[in-house]
Each structure stands twice: as structure tokens, then as C-alpha cells.
Image (tube, rainbow, N blue to C red):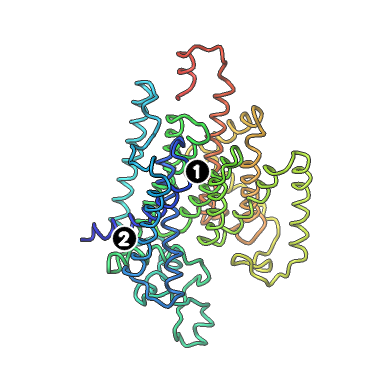
Amino acid sequence: MDLLYLILALGLPLLLGTGWLQLFTPNSLPGRWPLLAGYGALLGLLGITVLMRLIDACGFPLSIAWVGSVSGILALAAIVTKRFTDPVNNTAAMPDFGFCCMSYWHKLLFSLFFALISLRLLTLGLELIWRPLFPWDATMHWATKAKVWFHTAGITPFVEPDLWLKMGGEGVFSDHHPEYPQTIPLLQTWVNLALGRWDESLMNLPWLLCYAALGCMFYGQARVAGVGPLTALIFTYMLMSMPLINVHVALAGYADLFLGTCYVGALMAFHNWSQNKERWQGALALLLAGLCMTIKNEGFYWFLSFIPALIVVSLSLRKSLFFLLLLPALVVAVLWMFPEDINVAGHSLGQLALSYRPNALSPILTSFAVFDNWHLFTYLLLCLVPLAFLSNFHRYLGIGAALTSAVGLLLTLFLFTKFAYGAVYHSSLGRISLHLVPSVMFLIMLAYHEVCESGSSPDNSTAETENLSPD
């Protein structure tokens, strides 16, 4: 029976997200099915937590009956709507991975990398199922809320310890970080509600689904961006084989994998929207950028990184440069005048203690250039991205502005605030970097594709072209 309950817990969000997303995506889109599966799974998982909040706000208990019924009705409504709005193209079709258009050797390589990704999913899934809740933050900050909400069948408030003492614990609870967003513990609560019991291993299966969604989204948006199927899959494997990403699946319970997946989903949609101005991509980018703020406090700052990107893709180059030069001065002015005791995204200026910490610079460079967390990620970035910008820089201004802003904010966090200790002792640098690494990996893939395209001569023969490009 547990297997059926788990299929319900993971399948219903997938059906919910995919059902509604398919209403807005063109049927002829390259990589449509992987894109639908990836974004559908992520939106479904996050959407379930929104429904749980609404059900609790209406005074109903959190139960499989209530949450499952509402989710099922919404998923069914999407399917029925698709049936009546697109009666010609709603027949089931095999997922299009671009497989049939490749040569024999490319098909062989494609199958190999697909098998490697599948094996990675299987082994990480087994690791996740066999291991109880283990990581420190997961047990101290996140799952505390999930356990209380599961047993009380409601989103019982968590407050600061001093307020908990003042209230005598009446109707409230406390943990190390009561102000953390509710999304992650609600996901764990949802799986336990489906199982009908508290299970510290199986409740982490959403991390495996999020990991699979990351790969599907990455591949699907790469195909939309014009990258060939083999190149898209190889870079998808390179992303999904990164050691620290794998650790966050096997040692599930942190929020960083979800935030990194949500941010890259928003950024990829934003980039492809900036190229073709398709409304569904723009809406997807806006929705996921906003949902970043519901996962972790840092999501607020990654949301802000889209402001420079939007300026660049919406205005002329001269106006963009003017506003981008004005923006740092505006930020400094806001920091100068902003009250030090007001919290923004969980922190105040007084708590951050702004000043330069030079001892954090070397650990940051070591983490990216020496440690094995990200494989050869840094060297690919340094080699490919400058070449791509020299080749066709206009195409990458939007995604480049967003990632430059986000990386700038990350360096500010570890070089100019009290959180520099997270870099010095390597205690949080890797986790926070996980929010941005998948997005930078997407830029690296686009850069590689651009370099291959610019290096191909139109006079080359078909055989030569096939040798130059893996697609």
C-alpha cells in the first residue's frame, strides 16, 4: 500500500502542474515533453504547498482527503479544459527527444548518457529511501515544522523562543529558525499525510522528483534555445552529476536544491522569452522568480537579480547602460538611508554588520577552482563564456545581467557581511552557490553552442559538420 500512497503523493503534483502547463505551451515545441514534465513537477510540488496554506487558512484540517481532493479536482479541470480547447492535438504522443533525427553514433551516445542519468536517479533514490533524516539544518530548522504540522493537521505557528516562553507554549511552537518559509516542511508534511504516518525517509522523496525535474527542465529549455539533442543531454548529465547537487538529493532535507531548481527554471524561461517574446515563457519566468521567495529568504535577492536583466532586454543599449550605471548608486543610497533595525528577507542591516572581510576571498576561490563540488564548472565558465560574448554578445545580455547581479549579491554576502564565516569555514558557501550554479551551467551550455555555431562554416560538407558538432 505504501507504494500506492507514494505514487499518489508524487504523481498528483506532477499531474497537477503538467496538466495546467500544457494548456499554454505550443504543441510543436522542441523538447516539449521533457519541459512539461520538469516544470510540471516543480510547479506541482510548489502548488501543493500553496493549496495546503489555503486549506488551512479556510479552517479545514490538513489531510489527504482535503489536499488530495482539491488537487485532483484542479488536475482534472486542466485535463478537461485541454480536451475541449484543443480537440485536434490532444491525442497522446511519444515524447520528442530529437532522437530520430540523429546519426547512429549520436544515438548510441545519447542512449549512453540517458542511461547514466537514469542510473544516477536510481542510486540516489535508493540512498534517499535507505537513509533517515540526517543533515543538521534539516533536523533543526525544517523538519521540526513538518512533524508538528503533520501531528496537529494544521499549520501551527512557530515563533521566537522568547515569545514562546512568554506565551507558555500555548498554541505555538519554536525551533532554531521559526521565521523560515513554510514550503519545504509543507512538502514533507504532504508526503506523510499521503502515507498516513510519520516517515523520516520517504517524506524526502520530493527531493528526488525535484532532481529529475531539474534535468528535464534543463534539457527542455536547451532544446527550445536551439541546442541540439545530444549536446543538451550531455550538458544535462554534466549538471546532474555534480557532486554537491547529488549530496543534496541523497542527504535530503535542505531547501537549497529546490531554490536552485526554481531559480534556474525562472532564468531559462526568461532567456528564451527574451529571444522570442513568447508570453508563456515570460509568465513562467515571473511565476518561478516569485516562488523563489517562498522557498528560502535568499530567494528575495535572486528575484531582484531579474531587475537588471529586464532593463537590458527592454531598453536600448544606451539607455540600459545608463540605468545599470545608476543602479549601484541607487543601491548604496538605499543602504545609507535604510533603517538598521528593519528586517528584509530575514535580516537587518544592523545584523549584517557590513564591512569588507578579505580572509573570505581565498576560500571562495578555493571552493570553485580546487574543490570537487562542481567538477570543471569554473574552467568551462572562464573558457567558453568570453568566447560566446565576443561572438554574439547581444543574445546573452539578459541572462548575463541577471547572473552578474546574482553572483555579485553572493560575493557581497560572503565578502562584506558577517556571513563571511560561511566561506572561511566552508559551512554554507557551497549550499548558497547551489542556488546559482545550475543557472550558470545553462549559460555555459549556451556559450558552447554559440562557439560551435560561429565556428561552423556554411561551406562545410555534411560529414564535416557532423564531426564538428555533436548534434
Q: In the image, which disc is placed on residue 371? A: 1
Q: Residues within 10 Å of mark 2 (few under 14, many from 20)?
A: some
Kind of residue at badge 2: Ser
Pointer 2 residue: 201
Q: Residues within 10 Å of mark 1 (few under 14, many from 20)?
A: few
Q: Is residue 33 toward the left or the right of residue 5 in the image? A: right
**Residue 251 is at least partly visible in this image:** no
> Which of the marked residues, 1 or 2, is nearer the chain's N terminus?
2
* Cβ atoms under marks 1 and 2 closer than 8 Å: no
Q: Quadrant of the N terminus?
A: bottom left
Spot occupied by residue 77 in the image (x, y as percentages of width and height): 39, 57
Name the residue rendered at 36%, 37% in the picture.
95
Q: Is residue 362 toward the left or the right of residue 464 in the image? A: right
Residue nearest the observer in this picture, 91 or 195 = 91
Q: Is residue 1 toward the left or the right of residue 392 in the image? A: left
Spot occupied by residue 326 in the image (x, y as percentages of width and height): 78, 50
Spot occupied by residue 138 in the image (x, y as percentages of width and height): 42, 63
**Image: 26 above or below 128:** above
Kind of residue at badge 1: Phe
Q: Secondary structure at mark 1?
A: loop
**Image: 155 above or below 445:** below
**Which residue of the protein is positioned furthest toward the left in this rendering?**
1
Q: Quadrant of the C terminus?
A: top left
Quadrant for residue 192, please give it: bottom left
Q: In the image, which disc is placed on residue 29? A: none
Between label 1 and label 2, give the one nearer the viewer. 2
Q: Secondary structure at mark 2?
A: loop
| Inter-mark Cα distance, 1 to 2 | 29 Å
Spot occupied by residue 301 in the image (x, y as percentages of width and height): 61, 57
Residue nearest the observer in this picture, 455 or 39 = 39
